[in-house]
Image (cartoon, rainbow, N blue to C red):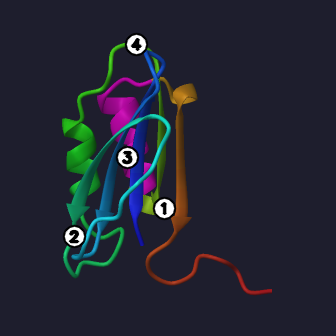
Amino acid sequence: MHEPVGVQSDRGPGVQTRITKPAGPEEELESKARLTTLWLHRGAAPAGTTDQLDRALRGLTLPAGDGYVWIACEALVAKRLRAIMVDERQHPKAWIKAAGFFCNGPSRVNPL
């Protein structure tokens, strides 16, 4: 499973992505926007178990001006990445969407 982190600027149609994936070939991503992708290979580590996205987000040079941040990954990782953007990078909460698309470990859903 891939874990994308995207940043889009209002200063032109540009998108930056940081994606973790197991070892193997990188996929060709198509976009009408100006797209910059950094693939972060996590080897055999399961999705959501490394700090690669944390480090990548902290090191990301954000474009000037307003920008929207979209985060989609393992639920606890999404929470951490949102905190990095809000608390460390001072990005407005209203301009961030952080979604946990799966959870590692036991299911957190109550049985019927």
Horizontally, is 44 left or right of 104 in the view?
left
Residue of label 2: 42
Mark before the other along the chain sequence, 2 or 1 = 2
Pointer 3 or 4: first along the chain: 4
Task: Report the mark closest to the observer, 2 or 1.
Answer: 2
User: Where is residue 79 drawn, in percent x and y?
Assistant: 44, 51
* The magenta segment: 78-91
For the residue pair 63 and 48, the one nearer the viewer reads as 63
Q: Position of residue 42 (x, y in %)?
A: 21, 70
Q: Residue at x 41, y 31 (%)?
A: 86
Task: Name the front one of labels 3 and 4.
Answer: 4
Question: Is residue 51 at all visible to an observer of this figure?
Answer: no
Q: Contact, CB < 8 Å: mark 2 with mark 1? A: no
Residue carrying label 1 = 75
Q: Amino acid at mark 2?
A: Arg
Q: CA distance from mark 1 to mark 4?
A: 28 Å
